[in-house]
Amino acid sequence: MIKDKDMGQKILESIGTLNEAAYELYAMISNDSKQKDEFVRTMQTLLLNLKGNFTALMIEEPALKANLLIDNALATLGRLDSEDKAASLRLVKNELIPEIGEAYVDLLFWGGCYPDSDAMFEYYNNQMKEFYPAPETDRGRYRYDLSVAVMANTDRKQVEGCLESVRKAVPTDLRCEYILFNDGQGDDVADYFEGLASQKDVKVVNYRNRTNSPSVIYQLVEGKNVLFLTSENELSETAVENMLKCLNSDRKVGAVSPVFVEKDELRASEGNEYRWHQKSELNTDVVLAHSADILLPTLLGAYFPFIAKRYTEFSSRTMSLIGRRNGRILYEAGDALAYRLPREKDRDVELEGVKQFEKIMGINPLLDQEVDEDLLSEFDFSGKEKRVDILGIDSSFGVNLLAIQDRVREQSHNLRTNIYSLTEQKTYARDLEAIARKAKIVSNWDREFDKCFPNARFDYIVMEQASDELLDLMFLLKLLERLKDGGALAIHTAEEMPLSDYEPRKVVGDWQILYK
């Protein structure tokens, strides 16, 4: 946050004036105005003055990237002299106007709100969606069925390979646009994108300076759905088709990602709904989402910005958390395959991100969300032809409950599965509500359990956080009574507990599993 609020406000006003000037420039080019060149020089002078002002502001708040965005806008203006009318209009509409808009928001948020929690939440609640509105429609009809947004963060050869795989994967019957974002990857990538810019339904944004901030993409989206990916990724030929089927299978589905495989395993596969795996968190190197929903702009950093270094693994975690807490279902489509180049994690960003994520989102992003394979190895998921009911007790994010559901669907081809949740961990209550058919918060197990889902019987009961109250003999007997014939009660504890002589019983890792 910058200290000199008056200077910050004056610069914001200047950027606002430049934003209006950019729209005026578009009109001048459209009308073949002879004053265009002089108008461009005036804008360049204003931008150079702003660039000088940002030098001092950057010392006060290093999180700012508005100086880079202003420099990008200068570079865009400089290219107008060498372009024809059609190309000039594209540059102003798809690059200059968004660049200036991004600079305004950057200074407003990172200079005026971050890292003050109250100011940040004020921005989230009252300004965020104003600056990044959902795409417009014509009487409910979007201009495109699909917007494919590719963020170039590799060399040209890999960018070409990524785009080639995407074009093969997009169904031919879709009205599709391509938004190609070069985030400062150099002239080679910029030249390649410029060669595509004149094609119908292609929008290009060439940043001279890298910002690591793809939020600009959301300003250009006009499709009903958006497929976002970085150029590190390549898709199988049926990936997009199968992801779209998954996304449109239920109104609650908020986002879908593919399964990542080795490059020699990247092949077409038939659609298979039994391989759609519900997740508490998605790998969003490739993600498909509805454009008007909250998830995509959150991933891009347009909504809920909170970490100074943009677009990190915490973008994925923020999107997933916001999605869960808005009642959205997240799916990994096992019938959609993708390949991603290997890369190293930035540990410094991870440490900064953990602190900021917990401060703003109220939960530690590094809390375990891995499936417990010891637990799953002892369950039989085949032959489940009738409805399957799963009860989680203090199940944190519900990762193992989702994994049980997925195994039943895939191995028994049974989609009739229900998750129920009882928890005393209020931190996870909203996350569990998003995945469960019914979910309740319990404050006293002895008094309240009998009233919770009294008519339900379960195939699987999973107790992940054992306590003295939960390991009480009478309570365990109540749980066993709630099992269907052939059902299993899994308790995560290595401690001695009642019913130690109960049969049939298995011990695997830190799990004790009792069968009915």
Image: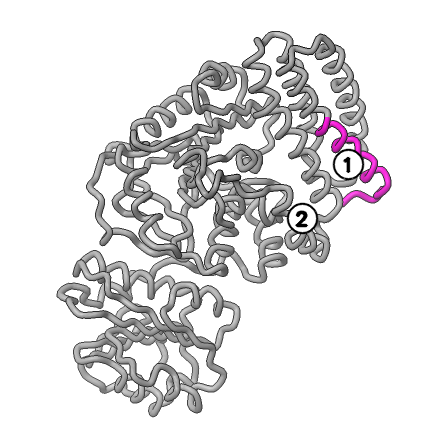
Q: Residue at x 48, y 70 (%)?
A: 429
Judging from the image, what secondary structure is the residue with disc 1 in? helix
Q: Residue at x 35, y 72 (%)?
A: 420
Q: What's under tag 1, amino acid-wise?
A: Leu
Magenta stretch contains residue 171: no
Magenta stretch contains residue 17: yes
Q: Which residue is drawn at 30% across and 68% down?
A: 418
Q: What's under tag 2, amino acid-wise?
A: Gln
Q: Which of 57 and 353 is in front in this view?
A: 57
The residue where tag 2 is placed is 127
Q: How far apart are marks 2 and 1 (CA)?
A: 15 Å
- Marks 2 and 1 in Cβ contact (< 8 Å): no
> Would you call the spot at circle 2 few (<14 residues within 10 Å), some (14-19), or many (20 or more)?
some
Does residue 368 sit above or below 486 in this rendering?
A: above
Does residue 464 sit above or below 501 in this rendering?
A: above
Give the residues drawn in magenta, as a range: 1-20
Does residue 153 sit above or below 417 in this rendering?
A: above
Q: Residue at x 22, y 86 (%)?
A: 502
* Residue 397 figure quarter: bottom left
Judging from the image, what secondary structure is the residue with disc 2 in? loop
> Would you call the spot at circle 1 few (<14 residues within 10 Å), some (14-19), or many (20 or more)?
some
Q: Where is residue 170 in the image (x, y as percent from the top left)?
A: 32, 32
Among the two numbered marks 2 and 1 on one chain, the one whose residue lies closer to the N terminus: 1
Q: Which quadrant is home to the C terminus?
A: bottom left
Q: Which quadrant is home to the N terminus?
A: top right
**In the image as oriented, which residue stretches furthest toward the front?**
139
Dominant SS type (magenta): helix
Q: Where is residue 11 in the image (x, y as percent from the top left)?
A: 80, 34
* Residue 19 figure quarter: top right
The residue where tag 1 is placed is 12
